[in-house]
Amino acid sequence: MKRMTTILLANPLSLLGVLLVGLVVLLAVFAPLIAPFPDHRGAVVDFANFNKPPGWPHLMGTDVVGRDLFSRILYAYRISLILGVVVLAIAVPIGVTLGLMAGYLGGWWEYGLMRLTDVFLSIPPLVLAISIMGVLEPTLMNGMLAVTVMWWPWYTRLVYNITRGEKVEGYVLAAEVIGASKTHIMFREILPNCVPAVVTKMTLDLGFVILIVSSLSFLGLGVQPPTPDLGSMVAEGAKYLPDSWWLSVFPGLAILIAVFGFNLIGDGLRDILGADR
């Protein structure tokens, strides 16, 4: 791990990704301390400062009801990161477990689980999420559920492919010979060899989850007002382009920074793991 961290930080693009993600995390965690107008994250109206361009004290301007855009972006970052972490915390264990079972147990387990995975993978992720959110009430909890349902199959497929190759290795055969249980072999022998690839994919997926959640909010199916969300802020600001350009440009840049940072870190980890092989 120490060697991987050293190599990652030695790569200029990966280092840039670490800095960008670190900045996003710090802004989200310390939003109550950094935000100049923390109460503007909610249902606040300030028509005296309605639709002001960037300046002091509103560094990124204000929206159509006078709320500070910079403050709302900080709190939107917090929600986006929480959504990303919660979605992966649910989807990854499910996908990894099913992938291990399908790859190692084989037979009907493999056929049934992988055909189910293929069904989910055949549907475009955003279309599946929109379909689910079209049925459910557009709340934060349902948004997480919709994204989770579309995310686990990718981990099932990834771990399944790794497990099929690992189960014929000598260390697995040795564990079988000494009478180790199937659960032990899957989770104590094979799973550690899947972790590097899973961690790399999780890093890349954090950015994509933020992008998908923002897309749902842009369509009005994600986080609902007055809760600040980057996608809904872009959608609202697009109505006032090009005159009030800051309403959509700054939230859009916030999405770009987060997604770009996670992608750079993920690409760096992928290059390291590829070189190690």
Image: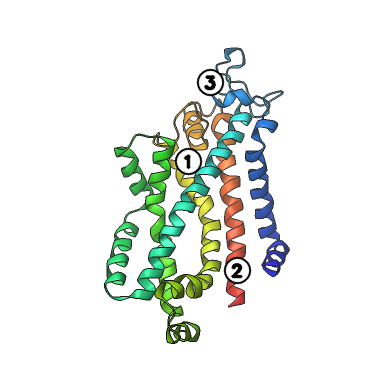
- Mark 3 to mark 2: distance in Å? 45 Å
Which mark is first along the chain, 2 or 3? Answer: 3
Image quadrant occupied by the N terminus: bottom right
Residue 101 showing in the rendered view: yes
Dividing the picture into quadrants, the one containing residue 221 is: top left
Q: Amino acid at mark 2?
A: Asp
Residue 62 showing in the rendered view: no
Q: Position of residue 143 (x, y in %)?
A: 41, 41
Which mark is first along the chain, 3 or 1? Answer: 3
Left/right of residue 192 with respect to residue 99 in the rendered view: right
The count of marks equals: 3
- Sort mark 2 into few (<14), some (14-19) or many (20+) by Cα contacts within 10 Å: some
Seen from the viewer's position, the closer of residues 35 and 103 is 103
- Tell me if residue 109 comes above or below residue 67 in the rendering: below
- Mark 1 to mark 2: distance in Å? 28 Å
Badge 2 is on which residue? 271
Badge 3 is on which residue? 64
Query: Element under label 1?
Result: helix
Q: Are marks 3 and 2 in contact (CB under 8 Å)?
A: no
- Tell me if residue 120 comes above or below residue 192 in the rendering: above
Foreground label between 1 and 3: 1
Q: Position of residue 186 (x, y in %)?
A: 44, 72
Q: Position of residue 33 (x, y in %)?
A: 69, 32
